[in-house]
Structures are given as C-alpha cells and as structure tokens.
Image: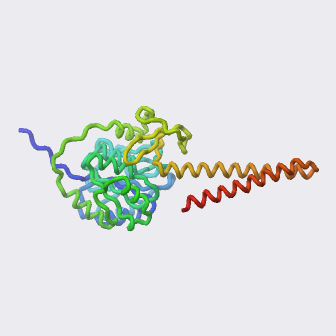
C-alpha cells in the first residue's frame, strides 16, 4: 500500500535586505516563535572585503541559531544561514551553494539570485521576504517566488529605514503580506504552521533554469534566450541583452552581470559623470598649456586658451545640473 506523501508547509524562507537591514532583521528574528521549524536564508548587501558580524547579531536577537552559510552544507530546520561577503547564496537540491558568480545590480551577495534559486528548488514551500534597502534588488526575484506558488512578504515601507527596496517589490508584485518588521516573525510562524492543500506540480521554466545557472557561474550565452538591448554593461563593457520578464524587464551581459532598469540608469549616470570629469580635466589642462604658450607672444595660443576655458565652464555647469537632477 502506497503511503501518502508528507504534507507540505512553507518552511524555506528567503530574506533580502540592504541599507537599514540589520535593524529589520533583528526585529524579524526576534519575533519568531520558540522552536520555529522553518529555515531562513539571509542576504544582506555588504562590502566585499568585510567579514560579517550578522550571524552573531541574529543569534542574540531571537530563538534560532544563525551561522555563516558554508558551501555544500545541507539545510536544517530551525536554522538561519547568512550569505558571506562576496558570495551569492543559493539553494540547490536541499544544500547551500556559495558562488562568486556575476554581480547583480552591482552586488554580490545579491537578493535576486537567492530568491530565484529558492523559487526553483522549493516552489510553493518558499516564502520571500523583502526588508529595508535602497534601489530595487529583490523585486524581480520576489516575482519569481510568487509565480512558482510561494508566499511573499514585504516590510511596510513606512517602517523601513530605507523604503526603496520594499516600494520596488510592491510595485512589481501583488504581495501577500505587507507588515512592519516586528510582525514578520509571528506571521512566519503562522504561515509555516499551515499545511498546504495538494496542488499540481509546476512545469519547468527554461529562463529560470538559465538564470540560476548563471548565478552558479555556469557559462551561458545570453543571446540564447534574450535579444540584444543595444546598451553596454557598466561593469565589463560587454553587450547587454534584455530579458523580457514581466513585470520587471531586466538586462544581462554575456558574462552574466545583471541590471534592473533603475540600477542600470544609476550606473550609466555614474559612467557619464566620470567621462565628463575627464573631459573637464582635459579642457583645463589645454587652457593652462595654451596660456603658457601665449606668454611667449603667440596670440593664437591665447585664443585657444579662452576657447578651452569657455568650454570647461559650460561643461562644469552641465555636471552641476546633472548632479542636481540626480538628487531630486
């Protein structure tokens, strides 16, 4: 006689945060019920060279032990695993995988790779949580978790020290729960305690498989699944390909660097400003050299100096206007 399959519960929790995320994470884990049976996988944006003190902070903040994730480690119930610096954290076949794959939105670890891998590995057992942070990392990955049947939670923007990541997620996904960070822990207790009704398994998703493979550092040609976008990658200069994924179109280059439209615009602005400063330096040097040459009685060098100084003044005004636009 065939035994019935064990009841499924939403017990694999992927959490993403950036600026202001430590405070939100402390509030979240502090609200978890004692002996909480779920597993939390946490990505917090951090400097590449800095060791993270986050596991110790989270262990002291709530009932579950938190450790830095180790490559190949099997996931265990009632544990918190934190992505270490300069590594993506992925869930693969019930095990943790650390990868130095391409950055996403300029980050490694990044939230979207974790969310995609958990959506692919856990399906409707997954819960995606977006906390305080700047820009929009996590929004695209949260949409994948929702599409694969998982639950979605976003910290209430008014409760977040930096509300942009929560707002981006809310703009991208019809989120199941929007609550303050202190209420997410008790909410996770309720969600994980609820048995899921039987449902048909979802079919394969070639795009999701390809994007998880890129995060694993598996070589993959972006033009196999996306058309050229006509833009260059701010990180490596390679051609970008547009991934038509609703509700968030995104961009990847041949080696895998990924960008949301908002972050790509921000990075392009930085590249543009850098080029303008280089041009301003060149004009000022030209003006200075021309004036030195004009001191010898050669008037045409004086004209060149004045032209370069006028162009430099115009360029300086343009840089100032671009900076004012970026802060508004």
Q: Is any atom of residue 47 visible in this view?
A: yes
Which picture quadrant has residue 193? bottom left
Side of 164 where 313 appears, left or right: right
Residue 326 placed where, x, y %?
56, 58
Visual colour scheme: rainbow
Residue 233 placed where, x, y %?
53, 42
* Quarter of the rendering occupied by the N terminus: top left
Side of 237 where 184 appears, left or right: left
- Count of all numbered marks drawn on residues in the image: 0
Residue drawn where x is 88% and y is 47% of the image: 300
Relative vertical location of residue 306 with respect to residue 32 in this rendering, above or below: above
Side of 164 where 36 appears, left or right: left
Residue drawn where x is 35% and y is 38% of the image: 209
Q: Is any atom of residue 86 visible in this view?
A: no
User: Foreground residue, 259 or 305?
Assistant: 305
* Quarter of the rendering occupied by the C terminus: bottom right
Residue 55 placed where, x, y %?
38, 58
The outermost residue toward the left is 1
Residue drawn where x is 20% and y is 52% of the image: 9
Side of 287 where 65 appears, left or right: left
Residue 145 placed where, x, y %?
31, 49
């Amino acid at each position: 006689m065939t035994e019935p399959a064990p009841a499924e519960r939403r017990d694999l929790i992927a959490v993403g945060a950036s600026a202001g995320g430590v405070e939100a994470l402390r509030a979240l884990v502090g609200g978890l019920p004692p002996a909480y049976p779920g597993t939390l996988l946490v990505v917090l944006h951090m400097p590449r060279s800095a060791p993270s003190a986050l596991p110790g902070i989270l262990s002291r903040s709530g009932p579950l032990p938190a450790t830095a994730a180790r490559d190949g480690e099997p996931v265990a119930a009632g544990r918190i695993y934190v992505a270490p610096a300069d590594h993506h954290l992925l869930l693969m076949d019930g095990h943790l995988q650390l990868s130095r794959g391409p950055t996403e939105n300029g980050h490694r670890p990044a939230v979207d790779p974790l969310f995609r891998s958990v959506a692919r590995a856990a399906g409707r057992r997954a819960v995606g949580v977006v906390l305080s942070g700047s820009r929009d990392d996590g929004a695209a990955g949260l949409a994948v978790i929702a599409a694969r049947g998982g639950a979605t939670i976003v910290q209430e923007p008014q409760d977040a020290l930096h509300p942009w990541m929560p707002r981006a997620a809310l703009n991208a996904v019809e989120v199941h729960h929007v609550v303050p960070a202190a209420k997410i822990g008790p909410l996770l207790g309720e969600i994980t305690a609820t048995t899921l009704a039987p449902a048909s398994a979802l079919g394969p998703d070639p795009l999701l498989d390809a994007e998880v493979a890129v995060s694993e550092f598996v070589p993959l040609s972006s033009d196999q699944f996306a058309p050229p976008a006509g833009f260059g990658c701010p990180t490596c200069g390679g051609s970008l390909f547009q991934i038509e994924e609703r509700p968030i179109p995104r961009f990847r280059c041949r080696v895998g660097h990924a960008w949301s439209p908002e972050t790509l615009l921000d990075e392009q602005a930085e590249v543009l400003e850098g080029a303008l400063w280089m041009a301003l330096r060149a004009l000022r040097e030209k003006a200075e050299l021309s004036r030195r040459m004009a001191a010898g009685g050669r008037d045409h060098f004086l004209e060149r100096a004045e032209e370069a100084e006028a162009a430099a003044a115009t360029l300086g005004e343009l840089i100032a206007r671009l900076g004012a636009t970026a802060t508004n």
